[in-house]
Amino acid sequence: MSKEHHHHDHTGSEHTDLDKLRILLPHWIEHNDEHAASFEGWAEKARVLGQAKAAQQIEEVAERMAACNQSLAAALEALEE
């Protein structure tokens, strides 16, 4: 039985993954923005319904989503370095 050497050329795969990241990061940012807008709308509805604590929690989620997007945007910028 002979051992076959299998060599991997990761350059093509890594390039493809880098291309995917360049597409996915803006998509994730946009998707999160849509969720944040929805959260803000539901927070307002909760407030109108007298659910101030729930509204506050939902608003915090929207704020955290914005912070996540800042990190995703920084990641996108880092890809270009």
Image (tube, grey):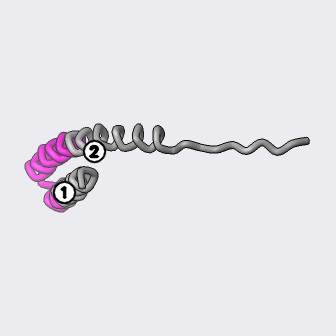
In the image, taking residue 13 as reference, residue 62 lies left or right, namely left
36 within the magenta span: yes
Quarter occupied by the C terminus: bottom left
Residue stretch rendered in magenta on the structure: 31-56
Disc 2 designates what residue? 25
Q: Earlier in the sequence, mark 1 or mark 2?
A: 2
Residue at 29% over, 37% down: 23
Q: CA distance from mark 1 to mark 2?
A: 11 Å
Measured along the vertical axis of the image, is residue 23 above or below residue 77?
Answer: above
Label 2 SS: helix
Residue at 44% over, 44% down: 14
What amino acid is labelled 2 in the image?
A: Leu
Using the rendered view, name the quadrant where residue 29 is placed. top left
Is there any visible trace of residue 61 in the rendered image?
no
Residue closer to the observer: 1 or 16: 1
Marker disc for residue 70: 1
What amino acid is labelled 1 in the image?
A: Gln
